[in-house]
Image (cartoon, rainbow, N blue to C red):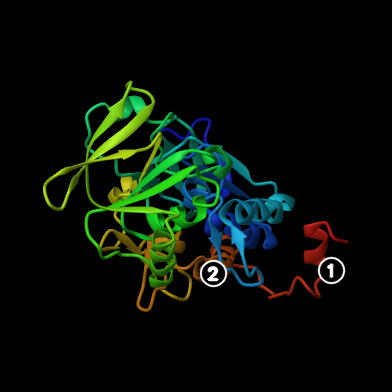
Amino acid sequence: MTSEKAIKADAVIIGAGPVGLFAIFQLGLLDIKCHVVDILDKPGGQCTELYPEKPIYDIPGFPEISGQELSDNLMQQAAPFSPVFHFGNMLESVDRRADGRFLLQTDRGVFFDTRVIVIAAGGGSFQPKRPPYRGIEGYEGHSVFYAVRQMEKFRDKKILIAGGGDSALDWALNLQPIAKKISLLHRREEFRANMDSVGKMRALVETGKLDFHIGQLKSLNGDGKYLSSVTALGRDGADIEIDCDTLLPFFGLTMKLGPIAGWGLNLNQNLVYVDTEKFQTSEAGIFAIGDINSYPGKLKLILSGFHEAALMAQAAFRLLHPDERLVFQYTTSSSKLQKKLGVL
């Protein structure tokens, strides 16, 4: 790997999800400038890619906020620190130089020269599991969707949701008020979803506002681009034809750690093991925050990732400026920090 034309960066953050975006803010407060690499084409990570309009209820100070709103707020919060984003890039290789700095390369040939790497890649590279049905590729983007990015696009549609997890139940409940018809297909009576959601779904079934079928998808019926119905195999072995023009299959995500797996880090069940003082990995200068990391007592919550970002930033400062004294300051009382944020 060559260092020619490499971008000199204080820190490179891998992942522009909520935790990665908050890391920009925390590092910025300490005058650490960030470049951010993400394989997606926009910020927000899984929150905006799969659930942009799905309400989140456990962000402190927000009784309810959507994934898109959270991402937008975090981008606004990070804006004073002028982060540089490199969307559509996947970090491909990392080499440690003799001076302790890292030389990074993306799959698009972008190079970085940095001392600090922050892995905030959520569950790694992820993609929805595609059902193995003949011709499904032709329907994708027209009648078959793996995520709901704008609810309004599904208004007055005859929607079939397939799956038995939280995503399937959540979207069945959220789309029911605007759909012309909504059906839910699951292979058994029991669900792997929040019991409150299951109860609400069953109440809609009882009042005739939602059709529930027990069975498994068998084939798609239509002109190769637009659906007219799907055929499911019922638990009695008989075919069930379900009238629909839209199919939302929620069969989970395929998570891959990707190139990170080859960086020589200490891994724990495909997650990156870190300490709980700095959230540093087994490699000095490489930190991991959010759902990508593992440690005793880990909770996969956005608010946990925010806490990890704050401690990581303190450790990154000490690594970058070992001879400087770090004075902890509060944004509520520090005029220095308030000037950085542009509020003074």
In the picture of the structure, the residue carrying the numbered disc 2 is 303
Q: Position of residue 225 (x, y in %)?
A: 37, 23
How many other residues sit within 10 Å of disc 2, few (<14), some (14-19) or many (≥20)?
some
Q: Where is residue 102 in the image (x, y as percent from the top left)?
A: 45, 48
In this rendering, is residue 291 above or below 114? below
Q: Where is residue 277 in the image (x, y as percent from the top left)?
A: 47, 76
At a point 26% along the width and 26% down the height, the residue shown is: 135
In this rendering, is residue 242 above or below 69? above
Please indicate whether residue 10 sits to the left or right of residue 128 in the image: right
The mark nearer the N terminus, 2 or 1, is 2
Judged by depth in the image, the label closer to the viewer, 2 or 1, is: 2
At a point 40% along the width and 69% down the height, the residue shown is: 199
Q: Residue furthest front?
A: 207
Q: Nearer the viewer, residue 172 or 54?
A: 172
Q: Quadrant of the N terminus?
A: top left
Can residue 317 be seen here? The reply is: yes
Question: Residue 188 bears which disc, if any?
Answer: none
Which amino acid type corresponds to the residue marked 1 in the rendered image?
Ser
Cα separation between marks 2 and 1 = 26 Å
In the picture of the structure, the residue carrying the numbered disc 1 is 335
Q: Which residue lies furthest to the left in this view?
A: 237
Which amino acid type corresponds to the residue marked 2 in the rendered image?
Leu
Please indicate whether residue 298 sits to the left or right of residue 317 in the image: left
Q: Nearer the viewer, residue 224 or 125?
A: 224
Q: Is mark 1 on a helix, strand or loop?
A: helix
Q: Position of residue 240 (x, y in %)?
A: 22, 42
> Which quadrant would residue 21 be assigned to in this image?
bottom right
> Which quadrant would residue 208 be assigned to in this image?
bottom left
Q: Nearer the viewer, residue 176 or 82?
A: 176
Q: Which residue lies furthest to the top in this view?
A: 223
Q: Residue furthest right?
A: 344
